[in-house]
Image: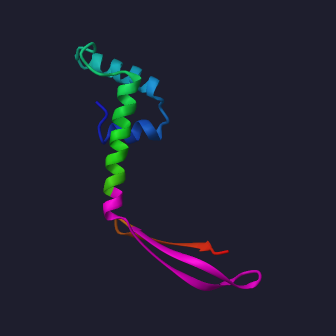
Amino acid sequence: MVSSNLAPVLNRTKVSNRRASHIMKAAAASLGHDTETLALSQESIRHAWCSYCSAVAEDIKKTLTGHWDGKIIPDLTSGKVNHLAILVSFDGVENILFCEKA
C-alpha cells in the first residue's frame, strides 16, 4: 500500500511506522477494504518504505554525475587555500561544492 506518492508524504510529515499503520488501516476501512486481508503492520510499512527508498536511490545513482578537481582558490581571510571542487549534477541542476583540503 505504500506507493511512490504516499511514501514521500509520510516521510515529509514525519509520520512513524506505527502511526502510518493506523492511518492506512483507517483509510483502507473507509474505502471499503477488508483490513484483515491487508498487510498493514509496522514492519510491512517499514519494509515497503525501505524498498521504495532503495528504488529511488538506484534511480539517483543512474542519473547523478560528479566531477572533481583540486584547485587553489583565493581565501577571504588568509590568502590562497587548496580546495577540492566538486561539480554535482542531477535532473538538469548543477551545483559546485568546495571542500577545503588539508
76 on left or right of 14 = right
What residue is rendered at 33% in x and 42% in y?
52
Where residue 74 appears, as percent x and y from the top left, is 67, 86
Q: Position of residue 91 (x, y in %)?
A: 34, 64
Specify the quadrant of the image occupied by residue 64.
Answer: bottom left
| Residue 66 quadrant | bottom left
Q: Is residue 82 magenta?
A: yes
- The residue at the far front in this view is 102
Chief secondary structure of the magenta portion: strand
The N terminus is located in which quarter? top left
Up the image or down, 30 lies above or below 43; here it is above
- For the C terminus, give its image quadrant: bottom right
Range shown magenta: 60-89
Front residue of 83/91: it is: 83
Residue 61 vs 29, above or below: the answer is below
Q: Is residue 48 above or below residue 59?
A: above
Residue at left offset 34%, top offset 19%? 25
Residue 33 coordinates in the image, percent (x, y): 23, 17
